[in-house]
Amino acid sequence: MKNLSLVLNGILAIAVAVLYYFQFAAPKPEVRKNTVDAAAVDSVSSKLKIAYVNTDSLWDAYKLINDIQTDLEAERAKAERKVEQRTALLEKQLEQMAIELQNKMADFESKGRTMNETLRNMKMEELQSLQANAQTFSLEADQEVTELRQSLQNDLLEKELKGTKKVQDNIKAFLKEYNQDYDFTYVLAYSSEAGGILLGNPALDITKDVVAGLNETYDAEQAAKAEAEGTKK
């Protein structure tokens, strides 16, 4: 038992020596130095001016957004009708092929026994060919409808993305001009549903100004467009 105690004490002594070496002898990691200029931060913070736009209200009140959504709904309904019409036409063609195959099969069943072997084989090959053609047509029709639906969905998505970009570009352009009078450091986006701003002081809310300015510009563009179209006529 004494020998075991001596061995344990020896092991503990070695462990303490190793820990002591790594604690005091190992090189210490370099301390990262901050690169931010505190004086510059204080200078900017003292002049910080912040406003926000309620994007929920903006999305409801901006006429361009409403028009884009209306156009997209019309395009979506048009695309659905196009798919439905093409599907109905293909189904009708497939139905006609099925009726033709059914009639020929019925005719073969009633007359097949009286046919000679050569004619009977020809009729059987014809039926097999009609059946194969109907199956191929069905598969190709499904593929065509799928591709048509996907193509129309891609077109709608592209139009939606273009509309969203136009809205964003218009907002940025207006705020850039609007901010010449106020010199805000930041104009933030506020949403009751999602977003980083959980609470906003109403005094900092410039949503009404932004909506009014955007709609004024949009009305002027629409009036100019209508006048140009009237001149062409």
Image (spheres, rainbow, N blue to C red):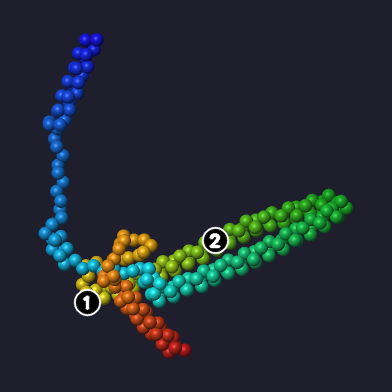
At a point 22% along the width and 74% down the height, the residue shown is 182
- Secondary structure under tag 1 reads loop
- Secondary structure under tag 2 reads helix
Answer left or right for 137 relative to 155: right
Answer left or right for 24 relative to 163: left
Earlier in the chain: of badge 1 and badge 2, it is 2
Q: Residue furthest right?
A: 114
At a point 35% along the width and 68% down the height, the residue shown is 55
Q: Nearer the viewer, residue 36 or 43?
A: 43
In this view, 11 is above or below 180: above
> Which numbered tag is attached to residue 181?
1
Q: Position of residue 157 (x, y in %)?
A: 45, 65
> Which numbered tag is attached to residue 147?
2
Answer left or right for 50 relative to 117: left
The picture quadrant where one finds residue 209 is bottom left
Q: Nearer the viewer, residue 114 or 64?
A: 64
Q: Residues within 10 Å of mark 1 (few under 14, many from 20)?
A: few
Q: Position of residue 63 (x, y in %)?
A: 40, 76
Instruction: Inspect this view and state whether residue 59 appears.
Output: yes
Q: Position of residue 142 (x, y in %)?
A: 60, 58
Mark-to-mark CA distance, 1 and 2: 52 Å
The picture quadrant where one finds residue 127 is bottom right
Instruction: Inspect this view and state whether residue 165 appears.
Output: no
Q: Amino acid at mark 2?
A: Glu
Looking at the image, is mark 1 or mark 2 nearer the viewer?
1
At a point 14% along the width and 48% down the height, the residue shown is 33
Q: Residues within 10 Å of mark 2 (few under 14, many from 20)?
A: few
Q: Amino acid at mark 1?
A: Asp
The picture quadrant where one finds residue 218 is bottom left
